Image (cartoon, rainbow, N blue to C red):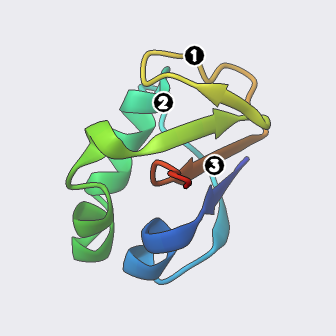
Amino acid sequence: MTRLLYFAWVKEKTGIASEDVDLPESAGTVADVIAWLKTRGPEFENAFAQSETIRAAVDQTHARADASIAGAREIAFFPPVTGG
């Protein structure tokens, strides 16, 4: 079981802040998880439509799309953060 966390507009578009899921065995990277999430309904498809802009953290460490999720307990998704 892996906890997925959604922040900012990703949370708004999915309608949930977090969930515990059994990821498919085929999901080996952050990008694979995003691809799987897009198949879970229109709210997820909309939230991850521009997946190249989504940032992720695996077990609270920033991760690229090609990062392995092997053994991950938590994966967080959030939009890019900008500041002034």
Please state if 65 lies on the left or on the right of 46 as rendered: right
Residue 2: mark in rendering = none
Under tag 1, what secondary structure? loop
Between the C-alphas of marks 2 and 1, the distance is 7 Å
Badge 2 crowding class, 10 Å Cα cut-off, few under 14, some 14 to 19, many 20 or more, is many
Q: Quadrant of the C terminus?
A: bottom right
Q: Identify the residue shown where x is 45% and y is 54%.
A: 79
Between the C-alphas of marks 2 and 3, the distance is 10 Å
Q: How many marks?
A: 3
Which residue corresponds to mark 2? 30
Residue 68: mark in rendering = 1
Q: Quarter of the image holding residue 49?
A: bottom left
Q: Reply above or below: 42 against 35.
A: below
Q: Callout 2, which amino acid?
A: Val
Q: Identify the residue shown where x is 22% and y is 49%.
A: 50
* N-terminal-most mark, 2 or 3: 2
Residue 78's spot in the image, x, y percent? 52, 54
As rendered, which of 4 and 50 lies closer to the eye?
50
Q: Callout 3, which amino acid?
A: Ala
Which residue corresponds to mark 3? 76
